[in-house]
Structure formats: C-alpha cells, structure tokens
Image (cartoon, rainbow, N blue to C red):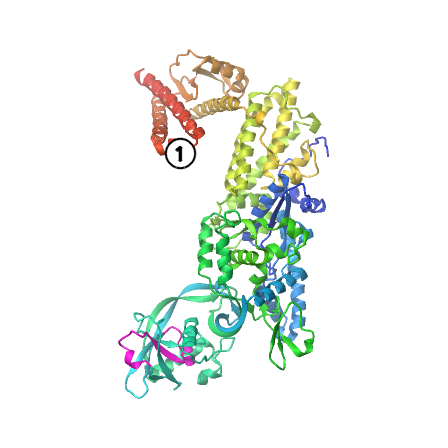
Amino acid sequence: MEEENKTVMSSKYDSAKVERDRYRFWVDGNFFEADCDKEKEPFTIVIPPPNVTGKLHLGHAWDTTMQDTIARMKRMQGYDVLWLPGMDHAGIATQAKIEARLKEQGQSRHELGREKFLEAAWDWKEEYADFIRSQWEKLGLGLDYSRERFTMDDGLSAAVREVFVTMYEKGLIYRGQYIINWDPVTQTALSDIEVEYEEVEGKFYHMRYPIKGSNETIDIATTRPETMLGDTAVAVHPDDVRYKHLIGQTVILPLVGRELTIVADWYVDMEMGSGAVKITPAHDPNDFEIGNRHNLERILVMHEDGSMNENALDYQGLDRFDCRKQLVQDLQEQGFLLKIEDHVHQVGHSERSGAVVEPYLSTQWFVYMKPLADDAIALQQQDDEKVHFVPDRFERTYLHWMENIRDWCVSRQLWWGHRIPAWYHKKTGDMYVGREAPDDLENWEQDDDVLDTWFSSALWPFSTMGWPDDDAEDLNRYFPTDVLVTGYDIIFFWVARMIFQSKQFTGKRPFRDVLIHGLIRDAEGQKMSKSLGNGVDPMDVIDQYGADSLRYFLLTGSTPGQDLRFHWEKVEATWNFANKVWNASRFSLMNMDNFRYEDIDLSGDKSLADKWILTRLNETIEHVTRNTDKYEFGEAGRHLYNFIWDELCDWYIEMAKLPLYGDDEHAKKTTRSVLAYVLDRTMRMLHPYMPFITEEIWQQLPHKGDSITVAKWPEPIASFHDEAAADEMKRLVAIIKSVRNSRAEVDTPISKPVQLYIKAESEAIVQELEYNRGYLERFCNPSELVIDTDLKAPEKAMSAVVTGAELFLPLEGLIDVDKEINRLEKELAKWTDEVDRVQKKLANEGFTSKAPQKVVDEERQKEADYLEKQAKVKARLDELQSS
C-alpha cells in the first residue's frame, strides 16, 4: 500500500516498546508462511528441533538467529521460503525431568504405570512447547507455524516405523547381545557419542592369580577390580615366550575359586603391564570379542542400577564402587594383591546424568552401520550432490568419524519415545517386526524399549515434509533443504545421521549446505554451564537491551565455525548502534513531513553528498548481499555498521542539513528523496539482522507494501554509481578531518574561525573544491578560505596532505614549530612505511601475476597516492627545518 509519511517516532529509542506486538503483526499477516508459489524458487531451512525440556539457552538464540537472518533475506530476495519449526521429544532428558517432578510429588513412574506416565509426559510436552514458542516470538523468529512438527506426532511416528521396519527387512537392523554403554542412573543404554570422557585420577590394581597344580602365579592388572568376579579366562599373546608354556593351563580366580583357562589371543599387548590380561566378556567390549573367539562364558555381575548381583557372591547388594573397596581389602588380606599404583586415565560419563558409564552386556537393537556409512562417504565424492560444510574443514571431521564408525545401539530402556515396533509371541517366543501390531495382539507382547532420540531426529529434514508419502506436496517442493545451521558439537550426533538416513531413504542429500558454528562461552572463554553458574538467559538480555541488540551481537561477534564469547558491554554497544539508527531515522523523518512515496524523485541534479551516499549505498548492498550469502555475518555486519554510523549518520545527514534548512526547494526535495531512498534500502539490508527496529522505522518511511519482511531486497542501481563523486567526497572528508585534527592539536574549537589555505595540484581540483565550498565553510569554519594551485605556505602554519592537495592553517601564536616538526616526522615515517609496503607487494611477481587486474591497479594507485603524500610532507618538513 501507499502511505503518506507522518512522523510518530518517540524521542528516545525504547526497545521494549518497539518490539511489543510487532511479532503478532507478522504472524497474523502470514508473512512467514511458505506460499508454494510455483513462480518463485523454493528455499528451505528446517529448525534443529529444541528439546521440550526447558528454556532455550544462548546457543539456541545464536543458532536460530542465524537461520532467521538467512530466511528473512531469502524471502526478501523473492524466494518461496519455508523455515519449518518443530521440537524434539528428547527421550532421556525429558523422561529424567518428568521423573524428577513426579519424585517431588511423592510418585514414581513405576507406581503410575506406563500409560499414566505417558499422559504426564504429553502434558509436559504441551507446557514446554508453549514456553519455547514464546521465546521464539521474543527473538523474532520468522517461522512457518502452519507446518510445525514434533518428533512424536503421528506423521513422524509413522516415518520412524517405516524406517525401522525397512532397515530390519534389509538386514540393517538386528537384535543381539553385546557390550553397550550403560547409564546406571537413568538405567538405559547410551550410544558411543552420548558418552563424555573425562580424565580421572584412579588406581591400577596389580593382583596374582594362582596357577592350578603349581606354585606359579600370573600377574594381572586392572582399573576395575570389581569386574574380576565375572572373569572367565586369562589371555596372553601367542608369541609371548614368558607364557607359552602356560597356554591351555588353568588359573584359580582369587576370592571366588572359579577355574579359568589361559588362552592365547593376538589382541593382547605384550608390552602392556605384565602381558597377561583378565577376560570379563560381560563387562568389557574387547573382552567380549575375545570371549566370542574362544567360546567363553559371559557372567554378568551387576544389576542395571550398578549394584552387584547374585553372581557377585558375598558382594551381592553392594554398589559397584563400594564393592571395589571391599574386594581390594579382601585381596590384600588374603595375599592376592601385589600393589596399587596411581593411574590417570579417561573414564566415560553419561552425557545426561553424569554417572560413570558401565560397559554392560545387554540384549539391544543395533543399526549395522558400514553400508550406510559407505554410501554417505561416496556421496561426498559427488560435487553436485554432496553436502557442503561451512567452514569446509568440518567435512574432514565428519568423514573421519564415518570411516571409523561402529554399529549404532538404537534401543533405550525408557517409556518416553518411539516404542520399538517388535512383538514377541507369549507362547512360542517368535519375534514379529512390522509397521502395525500383529492381528491377534492378545498373544503378543511389544518390546518395552524405545528408540534412541537421534533415530527419529535423523529423519527430520524429510519426515517433516510428509515422507514416506512420495506424493506429499511439501516433500516434492521443499526437499532437499538448502541449509542446516548447527553446532560442531553435534556433527556426529545429528548431522552425520541425517546424511546417511536421507541418502538411504530418499536417495538425496538432506541439505545443500551445513553451516557449523561453535559454542557460546563466557567472557573468560569458559563453557557456560549450570555447575559454573556462568550461564546467561537470552530472555534476560532481551529484557535489558532488546532482541535486535542481542541478535546483532550474536551474528557479528564471531566467524563461521568459531566459538563466541559473551560480553555484556558488547551487547550494550549494539544497543548504542540501534539507538544511532533510531536517532538518525527520527531526524530524517522529522524533515520530510507529508513527504509521500510518489514524491521520491532521484532524477534531478544532486549534490556531491547525494551522489556519494548513493554510490556508497550501492557498494554496501554488494558487500552485505555477498557476505550474507556466504554466511559471513560478521563481515556483512561490519559493512552495515560502517555505512550507517560513519557515512550515513556522521557525514551525509550532517551535510543534508544544509539543503534541508536552506531556501532552495528543489535541493530540499532532492535531499528528502535521497534520504528516504537510502534509509529505505538501509532498513531493508539491516532487517534480517535487526527485524524489529527496521520494521518500526520502515513503516514510517514513505513506502509501498504491508511489511518490510516481504519488501524487495535492495539491488545496486548502476546509474547511481559515481566513482568520481566518491573520490571527490573522499578528498572533502579528508580535508575536513585534517582541519579538525589540526584544530584539536592546538586546542582551537570549531566555533573559532581560522584561516584555511588549500593548495590544489590542479585546476580541476580547485574547481571541485570551489563547487563544494559550502561544505568546507560549514564544517571547517574558516575566517578566510583560499583555494588555488599556486600558494606559498604561510609562516608558522600547521599543514596536512590529502590526495591532490595540501592544507595550511596559520595558527599564529598557537603553533609550536618544534611540535609541528615532530608531528610531520611521524607522518613522514607513516607514509614511508606505506610506500615500502605497497612497493614490496607490487614487486612480488606471485601477486602481480595471480591477483585480478583490478586489485593490482588499486595497489598501483595507492603507490602513487602514498608517494605524493610522502613528497609533500617531506617538502613541508624541509621548509620548517630550514626556516
């Protein structure tokens, strides 16, 4: 729509007032909904679904702000943008939260039963989903809520069953008894990447195992003596001359009395310890493999909660670590303990509960990973089909993991999650795996376990689009997606799994690009955590400084792939930037009352300032567009900041006051037109970064359209590009800055008129400066202004050089000649350094032969400019030193 400008901006920038109700305006206007317009090219992002466990943290704010910036820019560029929202059920984490709440209420899930517990879980999900949506709103995220998904909604649950059953039928999913990572606190299996290793100061326990029928013993060392209760063999290397005579003989297990065979196995390291190792197939993954090779019994000595079971004999009922203490004491008392050494080693801890992980023999469901990994690796060899990692170094990280992948344990001993679609016959014990339950359900029992959360999350890019329905409209239009934004800490958890599952079930990559960012740390570089108490709630930051300030800080504070340190003072600095934008816009709008969109006319005569700002606008549009497209938000933000703060606010708006406050109505209209146009395009560029303040300002500018969210992204206008004007303005600004600096050095305020002589190197520059005399008089305040090609430097005058001219300010009685000589000597050294630098660069054949000609020409121009300034400073220095 067309609007007449009426200035209603408040005198002070109030982020809370600006951001209040604006999101409702966007959502109610359906500006964020993908419209399936076939004339537009689709662009798709799926949100990394946050867990329904609590508040979003700063990492979520950073991650989603980057996605929102990309989505908003692409929408303005004319794409049919789908940014699909959703949330993850997060099995282990959510169940732990719900159980903690039940415990506070004096209940447990076992007392409730599975059905009632799941009712409580769904209530929890609805409660926290609402909370997360409110945070998305506060951040200003342009999500298409009409397509919101949840990892356990009906459609996604059907997709999970389809994948599980298909993989089972292909032999890619199997059930077996293996050593898995076990969390004794949450009492569930963990995948390898859900285990975090920490360096722990532990002990190495050396024991002697008696050899049956002789006085010999064999020395064994372990960090986990409690597992010896499950020993079923001792292994030595077949080539170890120390033990060759003992292979096949029997040792007696101390304290237990069980007879163990000494076996030979190539796995044993002869150089490690005594060269003999105890074999506990039920409590160690390597021992499990050795046990398989030698048909050894598997004796499990612990319960799922980490306490010792009936196979632990006299130690039954003790916690595993209490058992360790008691057992070591008994070994010592009975003469089996040789020594105890201090030993620092890596110990696995549960990512969720923090408990020490127990390698544990268990019947679980596994994904056979090698063929899936091979397909995913092969995908990366196809340039047109591969997933592009940004930065690309993370592709090596991904491939290394895929090349060394192990089978994936996907079953979890939980109630909250996708229940495994397998049933066991109550009488025959037969197993049935299917998309639907068996017909005679009364004779079957479903597997109690649920699937690993990452199993369903791995399907997220295509299951959310309607897969496995191949005719689903969204699937055919919006998949594969264009970019995924996520942290480097979940490349293995999630990114890798989405890639191999997408390749397996759609034949395509799930996304073209994956933009990897780091972690947010505190100001000292420490990882934010509850235990350290150094976390920052993004909602608190918004309450204090507004969403726009937080967003701009997050976007511009780091480069792709790097961590980001949070500094309150930097957020405050971005608030100052927003305030600068507000004040500049308010001034401009106050000077264009009743100015309508149809009044904008850029065809008439323009001042130097008009031509320059339009040229710089063109260049800024190019920089911001290119860098945002490359996900270089920090670089794009730097160009925006410099253009808005330094050029638009500090120079153009100040220069615009001359015609705005003057009597020339034509000049006044042109200035208003330029101001309106430049502000409009600037707000559009800034909008993806700071959506709230830009919408507020844009709505009050003369404009067409309902919202800046769907306004066209600005493009450079070739006719506005004026290189000559840019050079003239550069010279003019340099003169004004030099005069101000000279005044400052001798404490002469701008309010006090002083003489100013400008010696131009050509008549063309004289004419140029005379044409812009009004700017020089306004910003230099000269009592006398002389511009000529033939000027002699006045005595005791301060001087400065700019490209194409020398300046002289006779500040009689104020200038200290010795200080002026010292200043000029420093300036001469500066230009000499610049000359040396650029000449070395131009002397480098590697640079001149490989760099684009435009870049080489720019360096040659710099050389000429620096040589000119060097010569002028040297000449002026010689004058002062000889006088």
Q: Residue at x 47, y 58 (%)?
A: 402
Q: In x, y percent, where is residue 126?
A: 67, 60
Is residue 601 highlighted in magenta?
no
Residue 275, by quadrant, is bottom left
Amino acid carrying label 1: it is Lys
Residue 853 relative to residue 597: left or right? left
Q: Which residue sits furthest bottom?
A: 213
Query: In this picture, is 729 found above or below 127?
Result: above
Q: In x, y percent, where is residue 85?
A: 63, 53
Q: How many marks?
A: 1
| Residue count near mark 1 (Cα–Cα under 10 Å), binned few <14, some 14–19, many ≥20 | few
Residue 856, by quadrant, is top left
| Location of the N terminus (image quadrant) | top right
Query: In this picture, is 720 found above or below 485?
Result: above
Residue 1 relative to residue 773: left or right? right
Is residue 483 visible from the viewing direction of this image?
A: yes
**163 or 798: nearer the viewer:** 163
Q: In x, y percent, where is residue 361?
A: 48, 75
Query: In this picture, is 340 found above or below 48?
Result: below
Is residue 108 visible from the viewing direction of this image?
A: no
Magenta stretch?
A: 222-247
Residue 624, by quadrant, is top right
Q: In x, y percent, where is residue 103?
A: 60, 71
> In terms of secondary structure, where does tag 1 sit?
helix
**457 or 329: nearer the viewer:** 457
Residue 356 relative to residue 433: left or right? left
Residue 647 relative to residue 14: left or right? left
Which residue is identified by label 1? 850
Q: Residue at x 62, y 66 (%)?
A: 418
| Location of the C terminus (image quadrant) | top left
Q: Which residue sits furthest top?
A: 790
Is residue 242 highlighted in magenta?
yes
